[in-house]
Image (cartoon, rainbow, N blue to C red):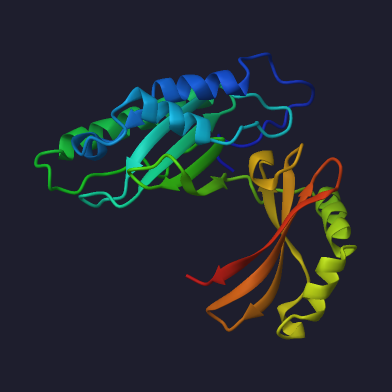
Amino acid sequence: MSLFGRNKNKGKAPPGDPPEKLVAEAFADLRVHVRLQEQGIASSEAFRKRLHEATPELAPYGSNQYAAVRAILDWDHQIPSEYMLLRIYTAYSRHEARLLDTQVRARDQAIATDNVYPEFDLPDYGDLDASETYIAVLRPDSPEFEEFRFYSDWRKEVRPPVARAALSAVKQLDSYQEAYRARQNDALGSAVVVGWVPPCLAHSSAWAVEIWLVVEFDGQVGKAKVFMVDSESLEVTREYLTEVHVP
C-alpha cells in the first residue's frame, strides 16, 4: 500500500475545509492539457462551471478528510481530440497533498520539455498517486460525462466482517437468487467482493461494497451481475449487468 492509503488512525480526522469547497477550488484552478488549449477546448469559464456542476458530490472514505483536491482536463492523444478525460485527484493529508503537487509539477515539466511541435505526442496526467482518483470521459463539445469511475490502491481492502455482511445482504435478494440459478454453469462460482465504491457511484449514504456475480464467461469475455451495498445500512443501493473482459 502506498503513502496514499486509508487513514488508519483511530478517532476523528483533524478539521478541514468541506469537500465541496475544495472541489470548487479545484475547478476554479482547473489545469487543461496544452493540446486541448491549442484546440480551444474548455477555454471559457462557463464551460468549466458546467463541468463542475456535472461532477458528482465527492466524500472521503471513512473518517478521512480531504487536504487537497486537484482537477485536470486531459487529452486523448488525438488531434482533433475525440474525447477528453477529467481527472480528479484527492489527498487525505497535507503531506500527501505536497507529494501530489510535486508529481503534477513534474508532469508539467515533462510536457513542456516535449512540446516542440504541435503535432508531436505528449505525456498526459495519468497514473499520479492519490488517495482517491476519479476519471470521467466526455466529448470536447459537451460537459456531460459518458463514464465516471473511481480508482485507489486500497479499494480492495475490505475487512472480512464487512465483506461477509455485504455478501449476506446480497445473497438474500431475489434478484441475486435468480441470477445465480441462471448462470452459464456452476464453475463460475458464487458472488465475490470487488472492493469499495464511493457514495456518488453507489447511490448510497455511506461508502459501499461492490460485489460481482459472474453469470457468463467464455475465457475471454462474459457478463457479471453487480451489486452495491451500503456499508452502514447494508442496503443494496444499485444493481446492474456489466461486461467482463480478460486483458
Counting from the top left corner in percent of width and height, residue 86 is at 42, 40
Front residue (pair 199, 40):
40
Residue plotted at (19% across, 33% down)? 112
Q: Quadrant of the N terminus?
A: top right
> Which residue is nearer to you in this view: 83 or 149?
83
Which residue is rendered at x = 51% and y = 26% of the image? Answer: 69
Left or right: 84 in relation to 122: right
Q: Relative to residue 55, is residue 178 drawn left or right?
A: right
**Which residue lies at the image location 32% right of the left edge and 33% below the top edge?**
42
Q: Relative to 240, is 72 above or below?
A: above
Q: Residue furthest left?
A: 117
Q: Which one is in front, 55 or 194?
A: 55
**x, y percent for residue 203:** 71, 44
Q: Residue at x 62, y 73 (%)?
A: 223
Q: Is residue 231 visible?
A: yes
Q: Is residue 120 left or right of residue 57?
A: left
Q: Is residue 111 above or below residue 31?
A: below
- Total labels drawn: 0
Compared across the picture, whether 20 is left or right of 238 comes to left
Q: Position of residue 175 (x, y in %)?
A: 82, 67
Could you tell me if residue 95 is visible in this image?
no
Vertical order, 7 against 192 (above or below): above
Residue 77's x, y, as percent?
26, 50
